[in-house]
Image: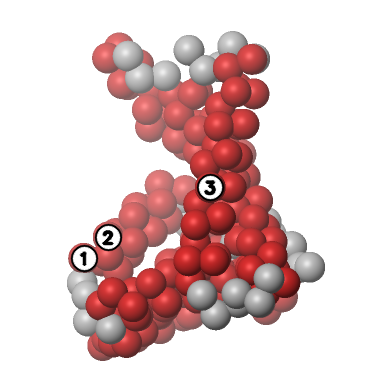
């Protein structure tokens, strides 16, 4: 079984996106993500996908990394799109598929052009003024790093769930994928929470 990686490892380079500061890149990704979620139409989905592909080309992201990201995303796309098709029809399912691929590529571009340590340092720096109102910047950065680290593991769970459903002859049933996948993700979250609490980080 393959081990997907949605969030790419940093790829050193000298492109415009590599030289851009962390702040503008994160802001652009946030604006892009909001636009993908808010603007719901097939033409808009094609435009956002084209923008994400253009950013990946501009950043010269390795094709192997793009392939791993899209292959890892395939299971989630199939499950989510199947549910959308069932509930809202084929056009909405197609939109959802394009939007998920666009978001995955945009996230891949960010992580491929920005070292993780630079992202975490920026988060701590941005949140430091909020320390006086009870925000702990280091804990927020820890939560972000855990979220980033959890993505490959979550996709691995998705692939394992898909393989188990196929082994039972239920490969075409969305519920056979979705229900055990959600249960396993929640269980993994509880395990992570227990591990953090045991180290005094859950209070």
At horizontal 28% and vertical 74% (from top left) the residue drawn is: 87
Q: Which residue is mark 3?
A: 183
Looking at the image, do the residues carrying marks 2 and 1 touch, with CB atoms under 8 Å apart?
yes
Residue 172 in sight from this viewpoint:
yes
Residue at the limit of the structure toward the front, as seen here = 168
Tag 3's secondary structure?
A: helix
Determine crowd level at label 2: few under 14, some 14-19, many 20+ residues with C-alpha closer than 10 A. Answer: few
Looking at the image, do the residues carrying marks 1 and 3 touch, with CB atoms under 8 Å apart?
no
Residue 102 in sight from this viewpoint:
no
State how far apart marks 1 and 3 are (Cα).
29 Å
Q: Position of residue 167 (x, y in %)?
A: 72, 72
Q: Which residue is mark 1?
A: 38
Q: Position of residue 106 (x, y in %)?
A: 46, 66
Label whose residue precedes the other's in the sequence (2 or 3): 2
Left or right? Give the position of 158 relative to 21.
right
Q: Which residue is mark 2?
A: 34
Tag 2's secondary structure?
A: helix
Of residues 68 and 3, the one nearer the viewer is 3
């Amino acid at each position: 079984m393959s081990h997907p990686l949605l969030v790419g490892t940093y790829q050193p380079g000298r492109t415009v996106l590599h030289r851009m500061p962390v702040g503008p890149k994160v802001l652009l990704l946030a604006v892009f993500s909001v636009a993908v979620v808010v603007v719901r139409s097939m033409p808009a989905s094609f435009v956002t996908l084209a923008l994400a592909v253009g950013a990946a080309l501009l950043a010269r992201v390795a094709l192997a990394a793009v392939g791993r990201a899209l292959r890892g995303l395939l299971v989630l796309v199939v499950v989510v799109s199947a549910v959308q098709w069932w509930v809202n029809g084929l056009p909405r399912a197609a939109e959802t598929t394009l939007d998920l691929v666009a978001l995955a590529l945009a996230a891949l571009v960010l992580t491929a052009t920005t070292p993780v340590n630079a992202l975490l340092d920026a988060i701590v720096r941005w949140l430091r003024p909020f320390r006086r109102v009870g925000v702990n910047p280091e804990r927020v950065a820890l939560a972000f790093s855990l979220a980033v680290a959890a993505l490959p593991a979550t996709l691995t769970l998705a692939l394992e769930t898909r393989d188990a459903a196929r082994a039972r002859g239920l490969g075409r049933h969305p519920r056979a994928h979705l229900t055990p996948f959600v249960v396993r993700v929640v269980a993994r979250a509880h395990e992570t929470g227990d591990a953090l609490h045991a180290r005094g980080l859950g209070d």
